[in-house]
Amino acid sequence: MRTRLLYALFGLMAALLGVATGHLVASLLNPASSPVLAVGSTVIDLTPTPMKEWAIQQFGSNDKIILVGSVLLVVLLLAAVAGLLARRRLVVGAGMLVVLVAIAAGAAMTRPASDALDLVPSLLTAVAGVAALWWLDRAHRTGAVLRDSSGGERLTLGSDAQRSGPSEHSGRSQHRASRRGVLVALGVIAAATAVMGGAGRVIGRLRSRPEDIDLPAAADPAPPLPRGIEGDVPGLTSFRTPTKDFYRVDTRLDTPVISADDWSLTIDGDVDEELTFSFDDLLEMDLIERDITLTCVSNSVGGPYVGAARWTGVRLTDLLDMAGVGSKADQILSTDFEGMTISTPLDLATDGRDAMVAIGMNGAGLPRANGFPARLVIPGLYGFISATKWVTRLTLTTYAEKSAYWTDKDWDTDAPIKISARIDTPNALDELPKGENLIGGVAWAQQKDGVAKVEVRVDGGPWKPAELGPDGGNDYWRQWVYRWDAEPGQHTIAARVTSGDGEVQTAATAEPFPGGSSGIHEFLVSVA
Ligand SMILES: Nc1nc2c(c(=O)[nH]1)N[C@H]1C(S)=C(S)[C@@H](COP(=O)(O)O)O[C@H]1N2
Ligand SMILES: [Mo]
């Protein structure tokens, strides 16, 4: 029994060392080729949409940590099994480890834009894992063999130090030597795993340091953003989302590191002339600056996947006009640096809205997580059909000819952002004092002439107008606050928005899939 446990531990330690090795090497070559991340990414791509949506609802922005954690857990369980197999025959256990790594290597190779170099982390994972298993097995068997030849007993780690008797004397000391050998091997492997794991993290962080760019002043600047009312309403979302707090949604498990010097944007497909722009080319063009609220289609009513920032970039139509769009195209298929695709209806992107290839966010270059060096920002459309990060290609094509990542997963191709009001304060189930309480939040109605009105309803009574915060433009969200004179007891509070073009937020509920959530943000609070 004990040797079984011991060998399961051997398998586990060998796998951990392998994973740490692979991760470290990947952090130097290509973070996405790390065996565990490669498997995780493949799982993301293969997961059916409803399950993915379920995971996002359940785990929110922790969904990826949970995914990577689950992959790791499965790997470690299988590695423990490999360890058990190695107890009988080392080659069988080692073989199983190699098969596990081969699966990860396969996943790494099927990633778009992968090359032969992406096999290196997996290869070294296998080498480290097998070497560790071999060493542990040898350390264990050496003692066991010595002992078998003298005392004939089977090794059980740390069980019989108290047993005594002259005839067992030499067996016992050899036993101790073997136990020491195993402990030394385990210690060295654990230490190496920790050091490499730590080094991998540090290198990853160093590599993904932001690149400093000098963002030129916009030729077409935005008016100064008025001061928000967050200072007056505790718990209210700030009028401008600080860059570091901006939500992040994408299919990646790593943060891409692309240097501005190596980056370029190509416009091709149904165009008069195929064009390629360098980052410096964009810096030299006329830049526009706009305050725009981005929204993710996976945001549920009242959810966190929405953020408001000041974006700086080149007007999309300036670029398209230079290339000369042909008559056949009805879609802009944008491609990121690794081949991930997003499709945008051409007519919407070019109808006069402030669509841009953005290179700046809140007055600085884009953070790597939000698309450095460049991304699309198109007001009024959910991010999954408009906001391509790390974008390198815009192809003018048709929906009949080409389909994008989420189109293939049956999400809508035409997905305007649904108008919505969110209550930020109080929170559901809060205990409030009786008397005046502030109910506050944000509301958005991009490309629908902005927010005209926000109303609050208590206990299903009449809708009453809230006060609106300052105006940051029609593509920007609006803060709102309602002074509520609360009576003791349980109360349901709700909020809804009316857009400038007269649409009242619907009470009809819809899930995020396939075209965005709808319904009213409503929940219970109690008043003492
Ligand atoms: N390359 C790439 N761009 C992408 C995505 C992605 O998965 N890959 N996700 C999109 C989605 S669904 C949204 S909502 C926005 C989110 O942008 P943010 O992470 O900067 O908030 O990016 C979009 N751009
Ligand atoms: Mo999204």
Image (tube, grey):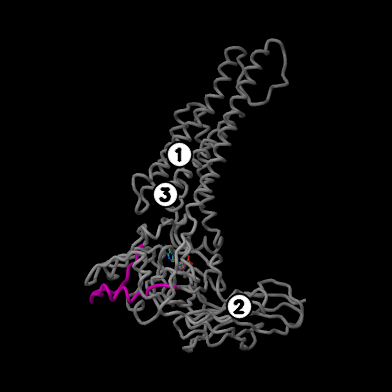
How much space separates mark 3 and mark 2, taking CA atoms? 41 Å
User: Percent x, y for residue 155?
Assistant: 61, 22
Q: Which mark is residue 441?
A: 2
| Residue range (magenta) | 312-335
User: Percent x, y for residue 266?
Assistant: 30, 65
Q: Which residue is identified by label 3?
A: 30
**Along the line of sight, which residue is nearer the eye, 248 or 508?**
248
- Residue at screen point 40% across, 69% down: 376
Q: Residues within 10 Å of mark 3 (few under 14, many from 20)?
A: many
Q: Earlier in the sequence, mark 2 or mark 1?
A: 1
Ligand 1 closer than 8 Å to label 2 CB:
no
Which quadrant of the figure has residue 195?
top right
Please state which amino acid type lies under the numbered disc 1. Thr
Q: Which mark is residue 125?
A: 1
Badge 1 marks a residue whose secondary structure is: helix
How much space separates mark 2 and mark 1, taking CA atoms? 49 Å
How much space separates mark 1 and mark 3, taking CA atoms? 15 Å
